[in-house]
């Protein structure tokens, strides 16, 4: 009986992931379009293709389970996608927009890493070796994407820090520095 409970939870987790990945299939083209950096745009486009593969892997698992992937909406991803859309609608320019997009994308990746890690562990306990292999492959790709975003962020964040519009002054430069405290 306990195994059935975990199996139900596992299927629920897979449905959540299926919904999440399908939401990303719709969101990634918008993020790519909003990106200023060619490298970031290409990264989003490549991740879109990878995300489509993630959907196919999940569909393969559902076929093996003889279950439907439909019937659940991932509200966590819905919120993350909404945050990403809000970043796109902001008045950010150039590298600052790219930095905002990277932040939104990394929140998505961390969410997916947690969800795929959970599903993979459930599959292991349930003895679903073929599922484990498929889920582990996706998990590794999500981690790689996060690492690529971190690398891109290093240059883009530095550039964003330098992209100060001429009509704005840096308040931190005009403020007097506090005296250093001696312990």
Image: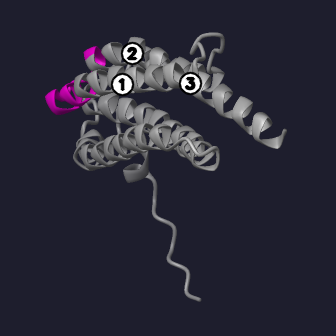
Residue furthest left in the image: 38
Quadrant holding the C terminus: bottom right
Taking the image as drawn, is residue 33 in sight? yes
How many neighbours does mark 2 have within 10 angstroms: few (below 14), some (14-19), or many (20 or more)? some
Instruction: Work out whether 116 lies above or below 58.
Output: below
- Tally the numbered discs: 3
Q: Which residue is mark 1?
A: 51
Which residue is rendered at x = 45% and y = 53% of the image?
Answer: 175
Q: CA distance from mark 2 to mark 1?
A: 7 Å
Callout 1 secondary element: helix
Callout 3 secondary element: helix
Of the residues under marks 1 and 3, which one precedes in the sequence?
A: 1
Classified by dominant secondary structure, the portion drawn in magenta counts as helix
Res 130 → quadrant: top left
How many neighbours does mark 3 have within 10 angstroms: few (below 14), some (14-19), or many (20 or more)? many
Q: What is the x, y in percent for residue 58?
A: 47, 25
Q: CA distance from mark 3 to mark 2?
A: 12 Å
Residue in the foreground of this view, choosing between 98 and 58: 58
Which residue is rendered at x = 25% and y = 36% of the image?
Answer: 163
Q: Which residue is mark 2?
A: 25
Residue in the foreground of this view, choosing between 51 and 147: 51
Residue in the foreground of this view, choosing between 122 and 167: 122
Residue furthest bottom in the image: 183
Q: What is the x, y in percent for residue 77?
A: 56, 24
How many neighbours does mark 1 have within 10 angstroms: few (below 14), some (14-19), or many (20 or more)? many
Residue furthest right in the image: 1
Q: Which residue is mark 3?
A: 77
From the viewer's perspective, tell me whether residue 59 is left or right of residue 183.
Answer: left
- Residue range in magenta is 33-44
Res 100 → quadrant: top left
- Asked if the residues shown at circle 2 and circle 1 are in contact, with their CB atoms under 8 angstroms apart, the answer is yes
Which residue is rendered at x = 41% and y = 32% of the image?
Answer: 105
């Amino acid at each position: 009986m306990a195994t059935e409970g975990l199996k139900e939870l596992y299927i629920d987790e897979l449905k959540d992931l299926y919904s999440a990945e399908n939401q990303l299939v719709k969101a990634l083209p918008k993020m790519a379009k909003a990106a200023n950096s060619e490298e970031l745009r290409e990264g989003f486009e490549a991740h879109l293709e990878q995300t489509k593969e993630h959907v196919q892997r999940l569909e393969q698992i559902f076929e093996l389970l003889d279950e439907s992937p439909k019937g659940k909406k991932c509200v966590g991803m819905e919120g993350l996608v909404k945050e990403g859309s809000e970043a796109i609608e902001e008045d950010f320019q150039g590298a600052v927009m790219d930095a905002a997009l990277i932040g939104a994308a990394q929140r998505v990746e961390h969410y997916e890493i947690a969800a795929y890690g959970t599903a993979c562990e459930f599959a292991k306990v349930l003895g679903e070796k073929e599922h484990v292999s498929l889920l582990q492959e996706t998990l590794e790709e999500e981690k790689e994407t996060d690492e690529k975003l971190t690398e891109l962020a290093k240059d883009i964040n530095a550039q964003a820090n330098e992209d100060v519009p001429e009509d704005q002054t840096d308040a931190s430069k005009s403020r007097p520095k506090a005296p250093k405290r001696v312990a």
